[in-house]
Amino acid sequence: MCMDVSVTVPTLFKREKSLRALLNSLTSQTYKDFKVIIITPNLTRNSKERLFALLEESKLDFSICIQNGSGFVNAINTALDVCREINISTDDDAILDKHVIEKYVLALMDNKIGLATGFVNYLPPFFNRTLFLYLSSYFLDSKPLTQNLYGYITFFNRAGIITLKPTVIFQTLKRFRTLTPIGVNMAWRKEAVKGFRIPEFLKKGILNESYLALVCTERGLEVLSLKEINVLHPKSKDSLSRSKTWIDDFTKIFEYYLSPAIVNRIVPIDIDQLSTYYKQITKISLFNYPMIAKLALQTALEITINNYDDKKIDKLFKNTYELIKLMNPSFFNN
């Protein structure tokens, strides 16, 4: 195997112990020829010195990339820019099984595969839903799974993206197609996602990985969940993507239901279906947060119908996020 491989790690460098554990797991990898790229906002001089010393101590080939913006979405976009031919994406508080890089490289050497994801703590991401989609899409021959849109994944299906055709890689459930990869254990081929950037008007970027997966499938590439690749993830509270306050939680819910507007940038959605869904949303018992969900879908419709550019959306979102801050946490019980 002769591939140009990187491991990108976004970090705020708040827990030195966690990052040290990750670096130790990287030094134990069976595949040795890779570069670690630490992606971080501008740190204090003292933090920079400690980070550099920690990386030097690991004896790994590394570089430190300072973000040209801020936030988690910008960190992922930075990774898309600076990564190598094959890139493994993980968190600063993860521990990789010693075969992770080798197995990702073997999988992504197949140019039909654009992105792959593995298991976390020996559990696959969103396994029950993914398996349901796998089986349902297969037997329904790519027809919509439901006439109501209960979440962003069904928008993808309405666009005809989940189309399972029998191939040798699906002889076992150790490998199956997915649109719900998980960032702490994910790898992509740079060419597969070339030119795509996650919109940075998003604050939390809760569906970053699924947007990357959708880009790959829209380009005719496979996105696979691989049972043989595992990462341990203690989920440190200081990790870059963790919720810190109820405002963070509200924002994630908002961005979840805003997703049709982002999906529409990759593959056209059914706007009439979205409009119907918006009208019905307060009647559906599945929604614990109807106010935020309705606000998000209203915003998604406005963006999509009017074809707003990022500058216009950013201005719109400043008002929206201020409104979210005014919401009371008791709305969670509505």
Image: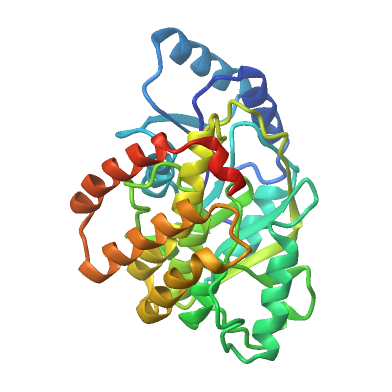
**Colouring:** rainbow
Q: Residue at (53%, 78%) from the top-left corner?
A: 157
Q: Where is residue 144 in the image (x, y as percent from the top left)?
A: 56, 85
Query: Does residue 286 appear to the left or right of 131 in the view shown?
Result: left
Quadrant of the drawing holding the N terminus? bottom right
Q: Where is residue 113 in the image (x, y as percent from the top left)?
A: 56, 70
Q: Nearer the viewer, residue 50 or 160?
A: 160
Residue 132 visible, this angle:
yes
Above/below status of 179 relative to 93: below
Q: Position of residue 247 (x, y in %)?
A: 48, 35
Above/below status of 202 relative to 52: below
Q: Residue at (73%, 71%) from the top-left corner?
A: 131
Q: How many labels does the image show?
A: 0
Q: Which of 226 and 159 is in front in this view?
A: 159
Residue 266: quadrant of the picture:
bottom left
Q: Residue at (49%, 17%) from the top-left corner?
A: 52
Above/below status of 61 relative to 116: above
Q: Position of residue 275 (x, y in %)?
A: 38, 74
Above/below status of 122 relative to 215: above
Residue 109: quadrant of the picture:
bottom right
Q: Residue at (43%, 77%) from the top-left corner?
A: 276
Residue 112 visible, this angle:
no
Q: Which of 111 and 307 is in front in this view?
A: 307
Q: Which of 92 and 56 is in front in this view?
A: 92
